Amino acid sequence: MQTPSGVEMVRIPAGWFEMGSTKGMEDERPVHRVWVDSFWMDRYEVVQSQFREFQIPDPSQFKDPNFPVVRANWTDAAIHYCNERSLAEGLEPCYDETTLECNFQANGYRLPTEAEWEYACRAGTSTEYSFGNNAARLGEYAWFVRNSGGTVHPVGLKEPNPWGLFDMHGNVAEWCHDRYGADYYSSMGVPPMNTGKARPEPAEGMPVLREVRNPRGPAAGSERVVRGGGWNSSAESCRSAYRVSDPAIDDTCLANDAVGFRCVRNAPSQAAETEAVAAAKPTPKTRTAFVYDDVYLEHETTPGHPESPQRLVAIVEHLKKSGLYSEVVHLRPVTASRRWIETVHTAEYIDRARRSCAEGRAYLDCLDMPICERSYDVAVMAVGGVLAAVDAVMEGKVTNAFCAVRPPGHHAVSDQALGFCMFNNVAIGTCYVQQKYHLPRVLIVDWDIHHGNGTQAAFYDDPNVLYFSTHQWPFYPGTGSALETGRGAGTDSTMNFPLPRGTGDSEIIKIFEGKLRRAALAFAPDFVFISAGFDAHEGDLLGSMNVTTEGFARLTRIVKEIATQCCQGRLVATLEGGYRLEDLAASVEAHLRVLME
């Protein structure tokens, strides 16, 4: 979101997190579980040009319009800048200029509480830094004493955290609203609350003694809290949980010329937003995009091959006969930039795929990937279909989309074609959502009868992608056991449910209603993809499961409800398998009808 003042902000979702650290300083203990309501936060620290817009004298030592403002005391940040920015946008100021008290119910700008700042900094992680525990990587995300050259730097030059916030671990430390208390965490004395809300279990070895909601610091105290580390900070003081009082009186930490700030403002609850929209105008019918182009028929496979152009011909003809074809929003694919394909696949593999097709070879990498001269170009357009769908959803042109593309994608790994798949359409779409739209948390639901080994591999150590798969077991490609749950920071972000031959609607729906819904709501995705393979259908040529057309409709409804609850309905489904033409076409129709509800 860009504010009327021209400041870019990120919406931070409501949720639980573990605040503090058992490994850090005494004032970071004990760890306590905190609930934070949703709020908007400046993507970058307030820069000098923004500060000067409101005729506030710029106290910064290092002068540059794109540098963060530094040496601004707490009063200038809170009372002057936040209030002036609120008034300029017609919002209610949060701060009383006489008492310095904050009205947290006002809709204007204020400084973040300690809890809000740490929650935003962690961005869904529980490690020492938002990128993990390895301090050697700090230079990728922050300017600190080892790489700053003794000066502040323009905002946004380093990597953002998983929620798209820049410079949270360094450049300049940042004022929080709260007054500082060294024993504040240990003196809260708040018993655990029975809130009824889903929340994650504490990390191993991390005792959680208390639960609180929206804490706002001690009631009194002469010093304010500073968070985040600055250009002259050690790696230790750039950790997510590190806290310090006014650095002017603490020469072991920061100096005033390394302290700045950023603003937050309240975000209405999803229920309140929905109510406001409903009151303003009638709720429109969901607009669903159907991505298709005849170019997808130009990828020719060997005679009798199950992944044939006739799959899409059957879908389109069936939708026209049913009348549904005229009710969807038709989207054409774009030619995907190589930049986006390289987010998942190696340059060497992309070149090999292009060259193999251009040279007229019969197969790429293996016998289950037959190709023709046009296959590479078609595969690029398959990726482009998914990217076009994401753009349409993000731009508000449609609510969700189904991509009738081929070749499919979920078996393709970074450097090899597998299982009829050349490029991993959903994995590339996920990186596109994360990098272009700064939506870090993506849920991928894969109900194809074959395990999506390529998608799993792409995000196996990524805590910001929740990959959920149901599939026949044992079966091609041999991956997807229940023991495959992720690696490193991504542990428990992969959920596999291998199912025996003959599994039908009731068993798979139970898994979706129980395991998927609970995990997804706790994960709170910003975007949802479905690898929509329909080869688990009871009549399919390749599989041995018994999901019905109505079963696929029910699975669609569950995933759509998750997207509606967590991320304003943002959902893109992409065709994977499904090889008995009449069953495939009927299942796609049922899938689309639920998306259009």
Image (tube, rainbow, N blue to C red):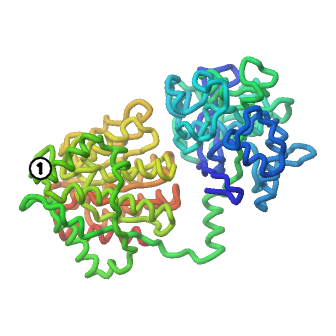
Q: Position of residue 89 (x, y in %)?
A: 76, 60
Image quarter in which the N terminus is found:
bottom right
Residue 420 appears left or right of 288: left
**Neighbour class for label 1 at 10 Å: few (<14), some, many (≥20)?**
some
As helix, strand or loop, the secondary structure at mark 1 comes to strand
Q: Position of residue 259 (x, y in %)?
A: 73, 32
Q: Is residue 544 above or below residue 366?
A: below
Residue 266 seen in this snapshot: yes
Residue 403 position by quadrant: bottom left
Towards the viewer: 265 or 363 = 363
Q: Residue at x 52, y 55 (%)?
A: 566
Say which amino acid is labelled 1: Tyr
Residue 116 position by quadrant: top right
Residue 450 appears left or right of 186: left
The residue where tag 1 is placed is 363
Residue 236 seen in this snapshot: no
- Residue occupying the far right of the picture: 98
